[in-house]
Image: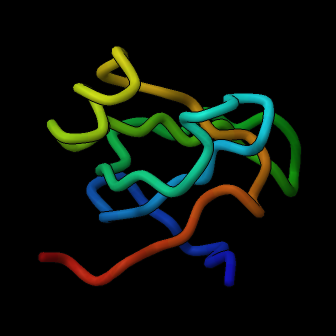
Amino acid sequence: MTDPEIRIGDRVRIRLDEKFGSRAGWYKGTVFKIEPYSEHRSFHWVELDASAQSLLGVRQISVFNPKNIEKIDPE
C-alpha cells in the first residue's frame, strides 16, 4: 500500500514494471530527496541498496507513480 507520508531518510522499496524486462521487480533503497510536482504528487529520489545498484547499473532513481513506491520497516 502506498504511504503518502514517505519522507527523506525513509526505507522504501520501489517497483520497476515490465518496461524494464528481466529487471522488473521490487528493489530496496532510501529516499534522499523529494521534489514536489503537484499538490498530490512528487518525485521521490531513492538511493538504491548495493545489491540493486549492482543488478540495475544505477545508484539513484526517481519514482513518480505512487503505486511504485512503498515504505518499509528499517532493517
Front in this rendered view, residue 10 or 68? 68
Q: Is residue 35 above or below residue 16?
A: above
Could you say where residue 48 lies in the image, as x and y percent from the top left? 30, 38
Left or right of 11 in this view: 25: right
Q: Which residue appears at 68% of the width and 84% of the height? A: 1
Q: Is residue 28 above or below residue 37?
A: below
Q: Which residue appears at 37% of the width and 48% of the height? A: 31
Left or right of 67 in this view: 6: left
Q: Is residue 46 above or below residue 56?
A: below
Q: Which residue appears at 30% of the width and 50% of the height? A: 30
Count every numbered label the image shows and give the total: 0
Front in this rendered view, residue 23 or 7? 23
Front in this rendered view, residue 3 or 14? 14
Hey, which quadrant is residue 9 in on the image? bottom left
Could you say where residue 28 lies in the image, as x and y percent from the top left? 34, 55
Residue most extreme to the front: 22
Q: Which residue appears at 38% of the width and 77% of the height? A: 72
Could you say where residue 51 lies in the image, as x and y percent from the top left? 19, 41
Hey, which quadrant is residue 5 in on the image? bottom right
Left or right of 38 in this view: 70: left
Could you say where residue 41 lies in the image, as x and y percent from the top left? 81, 49
